[in-house]
Amino acid sequence: MEGVLNAIADAGLTRDDIDGIAAFQIEGSAGVMEVIDEIGLNVRWFANVGIGPSQISAIFEAMMAIETGRARHVVVFHSSCEGTVRTTLGKGGSMPGSATAMPQRVSGPTEWWMPFGAPSAGNHIAMYAQRHFHLYGTTREQMAQIPIVQRRNAGLYEKSIYSTPLTMDDYLNARMITEPFCLFDCDIPIDFSCALVLSADDSTSGLRRRPLNIEATSTVLASRPSWDQFDDLTTMMLRDVGADLWKHTDLTPADVDVAQLYDGFTYIAMAWMEALGFCGKGESGPFIEGGQRISLDGELPINTNGGQLSSGRMHGWGYLPEACVQLWGDGGARQVPNDPEVAVVASGGGIFAGAMLVTRS
Amino acid sequence: MTMYRPDGPGPMRVPPELTSLNREFWTGGFDGELRIRRCNACGKWQQPAAARCRGCLSTDVTARVVSGNATVAAFTINHQHWSPTATTEPYVIAIVELAEDPDVRLTTNIVNCPPTDVRIGMPVSVVFEALADVALPLFEPAR
């Protein structure tokens, strides 16, 4: 509730201005009804939105509600207590794979991997990474730059979970989870809330914040939504989202000043770099080698608040707020120095994905 | 047909709910057969099992026996201990492409070889492990 109220106040609005609300609703997250009731909203449009086409589908839906005139100011939020669930309910919490939550039988998509000791998305993404290593010569030392650089960013962010520097030795000596992923290739479950206000183009006068523009979005799905039947076992759904995004703008990858790329597992951020055209297919390993290029003062700073690897698994909801902070120049110690005007936000990546370009209007 | 039996506890395994669509796939191994559904109208193989051909939309789709030969397309050596009753040893999760059509893939385990011997492109053939009333298609290095 407090997050929603803070977002409304930060925008320079009151609850009476809010005529729409949407939330990402999954098991254990808050829905719109309790927020509408508790803070006394009267809305013309509301939606609890699931996971397709990405974790931030509620934001894409809210944009469409605004575009079609259903609402002028929509507050969107996601709130989850996944961290508490997993630490209080025993190892793995309600995760598939935990003894407490183990189903007796599986059906639907999971029936094709749960019989084989592959309960985690990490198992599937690790196979994609391994194939990338095999085809393109990518190395763990290259991939390590994602958590190392992001941990440095997290050290400059007051809300990060992990802030002590991560060294290459730490990474290479870490416990393996599912090869080529070690502990530091995997994000961390946390409790969090995230809320933003989206407003119609013609309803931004008098707002407290300088309005930012959502320049383009993409949510295309051009192959099979399946871990093992997808046509290219190195790319996933993000491949088509990344390519399609540029069809809706005159901007090009070279115009992007800061990138917030989904990093539930390190390799997904690398796959996004290729999908969005920051480097060629198969070239993300050399692209991030040494880490300078993706650092705060590099040509493509990524995940400037530490990302999900160091600041926690916000189910894809942390990237857009961090893009806004950077475009507003409010990043403080972690602010990128290039006076950013264009940010890319990429959520999900595997069997669901969505991306957007955000600009200073 | 000899069923594969692991030496000790294997990976965490949750059996599938059997349905009219998937029963032949999940039980064919008791007869030593890997059965994949194929469209009788256009010849396209179907995986996962579906009532309708995703190529031509025909509903004339029936299970056929395939060779059980496949190639490793991707794999990971899993180290994470997902369940207290599962093995603590590393094991291989793989995606294999069937010889009949490389676009038909199965997520599976590679068994009967050290995990570190598994390579992308490696030829493998099917073996079955019983789990309750299903026979899991696993793969081992081709002989």
Image (cartoon, coloured by chain):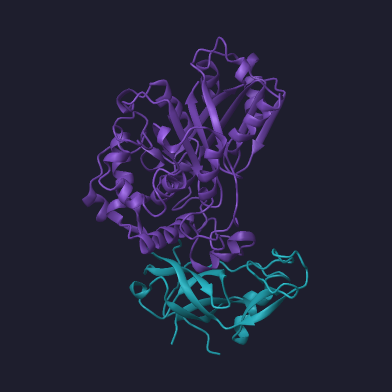
Chain colours: A purple, B cyan
Q: Looking at the picture, does residue A327 appear above or below residue A202?
A: below
Residue drawn at (62%, 75%), measured in percent from left and top? B26
Give whichever of A77, B64 is nearer the camera.
B64
Q: Looking at the picture, does residue B72 appear above or below residue A130?
A: below
Residue B86 visible in the picture: no
Residue lying at the far top of the rendered structure: A206
Residue drawn at (56%, 31%), measured in percent from left and top? A77
Q: Looking at the picture, does residue B139 appear above or below residue A105?
A: below
Residue lying at the far front of the rendered structure: A250
Left of B11 or right of it: where is A50? Answer: right
The x and y percentages for residue A44 are 72, 23
Q: Dividing the picture into quarters, in which one does residue A174 lie? A: bottom left
The x and y percentages for residue A28 are 57, 41
Residue drawn at (43%, 66%), measured in percent from left and top? B75
Give whichever of A89, B57 is nearer the camera.
B57
The x and y percentages for residue A112 are 58, 65
Residue drawn at (38%, 49%), measured in percent from left and top? A266
Residue lying at the far right of the rendered structure: B59
Give whichever of B13, B62 is nearer the camera.
B62
The x and y percentages for residue A42 are 70, 20
Q: Dividing the picture into quarters, in which one does residue A64 lie? A: top right
Residue B84 visible in the picture: yes
